[in-house]
Image: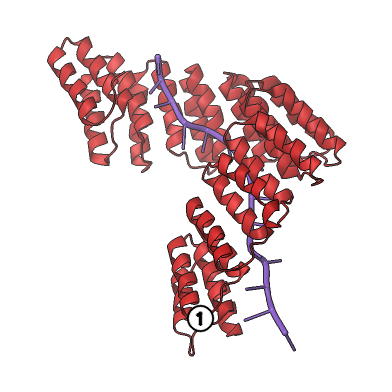
Amino acid sequence: RRAATQLINELGAQFRWEEALEVLQRHPGGPDRYMYCAAIGAMGRSRQWEEALLLHEDMIGNGIYPTSVSFNRTMQACAKGGQWDKAVELLEEMVEEGVAADVFSYNIALSALEKGGQWERALDLLHAMPSSGVMPDAISYGSVMIALNKAGQPGKAWELLAEMKAEGVQPSSVVYNHLISACGRGGMWMKVYDAMAEMKRAGTYPDMHTYSCAIQAMGASGEWERAMDLLYEMQTKEIVPNTYCYNHAIEACSNAQQFGVAQQILDEMWTKRVRPDICSYNGVLKACGAAGNFEKAFELLEEMQSVDIRPDFESYKAVIGACAKARHWIKAVDIFRQMQDFGVRADIGTFNALIRVCTEAGEWLQVKKAIDEMDIQGVVPDLETYNLYILGCSMVGRHKKALWWMKEIVDNRMIPD
RNA sequence: UGGCUUUUAUUUUUC
């Protein structure tokens, strides 16, 4: 049975959950608790939360008592599958079955709630822990801090930091990193510095990940120059920025319409031998798009291909957007074709950009082609698409057709704006 | 006489 347990673990590590199940089910004499736990873990890894739940029930049905580990693994499978409600249910079930929930159990449930965007429930659960005799640790607080960051609750995030200090729990870097992100998201860039200072005072030194979060936070607050300062500051502290740090800086500049600086950062990545990835290029391309600099966009598109970075739909969308901004419908149609030739799937945003530039140019044949192509590819029009159709109708005085599109909007359960 | 079972990051549209 030990060998079988190990085999199941190995299959699980390789995401071969069906084979793991077979090993479990075909074992002579039936599986034991260890085999079940290994199999439940394997299901969790492969995102098979329903199978994990079934296995756990099966185990209990076969007269094997559940333990905290068997429950925790099942909860973790639900958490990974985005089933926070199932994870919480299991936590409650543990109490009913007389199995003591440990700090792992609570942390898995908190993480499930965080992933499900349930920050209020996460806070409640955190506060309910001591009355069950389990004290929250840095991981518990970390998970809730992530939830507060994702929910854009910087005020609550600071409250949580104060709370954990008062409880005598040493805040981890995860806690500070997400506090920093939360401040940036809320436009509170001054608080980013406060959080970093507080971190040093508490003896947790900012590392590369912290700077990555801080650079992103500055970008989110529209402070691209401060983002750049942080990118250089970290290097004076001999912390080498990775691709994420550079990408956050590019993104900060791109959103602030600083195309030139974004381009400089990309160049610097090459000179500093930090390999740019698709996000680095897409970030600069987005800035090109906003500036309507389609010549540069085409250059970048070629450059990325020459370094074996395959442009994706995001890249093409930015280039088509650049053409649209420059009102260059011929280039837009051209690049759209290239995209199709390379087998890159367009999304509704790409179609909208293409339809807009063709509509504004009065290129009705191209508009029709785009509409047909959308239909073929099964891309569903959104409100913006219908608005463009109506705009086109109004340009050529086809009021009846415009009304027909209005009806289409309502029929497709959308609210006309 | 077996179980490291829990938390962190980037690009998503045109007006």
Q: Nearer the viewer, residue A65 or A197?
A: A65
> In the image, residue A77 lies at what x, y percent?
52, 60
The quadrant holding residue A34 is bottom right
Can residue A271 be seen?
A: no
Label 1 amino acid? Gly
Considering only vertical position in the picture, is A399 above or below A273? Answer: above
- Quadrant for the C terminus of chain A, please: top left
Considering only vertical position in the picture, is A50 above or below A263? Answer: below
Chain letter of the residue beneath label 1 in the structure image: A
Q: Nearer the viewer, residue A158 or A322?
A: A158
Residue A367 relative to residue A234: left or right: left
Q: Which colour is chain B painted? A: purple
The residue lying at 87 percent from left, 35 percent from top is A201
State which chain is coloured red. A
Residue A128 relative to residue A27: left or right: right
Considering only vertical position in the picture, is A111 above or below A201? Answer: below
> In the image, residue A116 lies at what x, y percent?
51, 45
The residue lying at 47 percent from left, 18 percent from top is A292
The quadrant holding residue A217 is top right
> In the image, residue A196 lies at what x, y percent?
78, 32
The quadrant holding residue A347 is top left
Q: Nearer the viewer, residue A334 or A186?
A: A186
Q: Crowding at label 1, few (<14), some or many (≥20) Cα neighbours within 10 Å?
A: few
